[in-house]
Amino acid sequence: MALAALTNVITLSISVSDRHASAAWFKEKLGFELRYHIDEAGWSELATKTDGVILGMGEQSEPKPGNCVPVFGVEDIDAARSALEAADVKFDGPTQVIPEMVKLATFYDPDNNAFMLAQDLSS
């Protein structure tokens, strides 16, 4: 039985140097559609051609190519995190909250690959 109740949404999070330029590139080259830019958070999201799969882009001055972090949507991040922590899953610091947008928690698999849980707060 799974410890965290996941939604049907996964976000693939990448680092980019210019979110607006990258969004235009993904639209032109792959036909992805812009969901939104949140400039004050340095974050943009695009809808891919696959239902439930979103491409998220975090702006960084020196992005790290190949650094893709899968972000799993959850209904209740506190419950999901508690269940995973009880199963000895390692998390990276406290849950981050961007008011009226999202709650995020980074965790690691046994090989130290980063993943995230995300609870949508926008609705």
Image: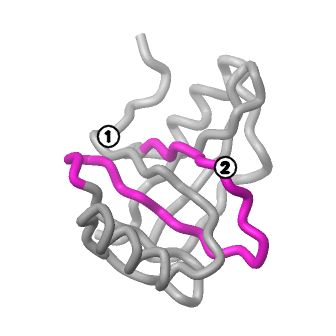
Please state the extent of the stretch shown in magenta in the rendering.
Answer: 49-72
- Label 2 and label 1: CA atoms lie apart by 23 Å
Specify the quadrant that holds the C terminus. Answer: bottom left
The residue sitting at the top extreme is 1
* 121 vs 67: above or below: below
In this figure, which residue is indicated by the disc labeled 2?
67
- Identify the mark nearer the N-term, 2 or 1: 1
Q: Residue 32 occupies which quadrant of the picture?
A: bottom left
Q: Disc number at residue 100?
A: none
In this figure, which residue is indicated by the disc labeled 1?
7
Specify the quadrant that holds the N terminus. Answer: top left
Q: Position of residue 10 (x, y in %)?
A: 39, 45
Q: Residues within 10 Å of mark 1 (few under 14, many from 20)?
A: some
Q: Secondary structure at mark 2?
A: loop
* 94 vs 21: above or below: above
* 86 vs 60: above or below: above
Q: Nearer the viewer, residue 5 or 116?
A: 116
The residue sitting at the front extreme is 29
Q: Name the residue located 68 percent from the left edge and 25 percent from the top edge.
A: 109
Q: Is residue 84 left or right of residue 108?
A: left
Q: Secondary structure at mark 1?
A: strand
Count of numbered circles on the image: 2
Q: Position of residue 14 (x, y in %)?
A: 57, 58
Q: Residues within 10 Å of mark 2 (few under 14, many from 20)?
A: few
Q: Position of residue 51 (x, y in %)?
A: 20, 47
Q: Nearer the viewer, residue 2 or 108?
A: 108
Q: Name the residue located 22 percent from the left edge and 53 percent from the top edge.
A: 49
Q: Is residue 26 left or right of residue 43?
A: left
Q: Which tag is nearer the camera, tag 2 or tag 1?
A: 2
Q: Amino acid at mark 1?
A: Thr
Q: Amino acid at mark 2?
A: Asn
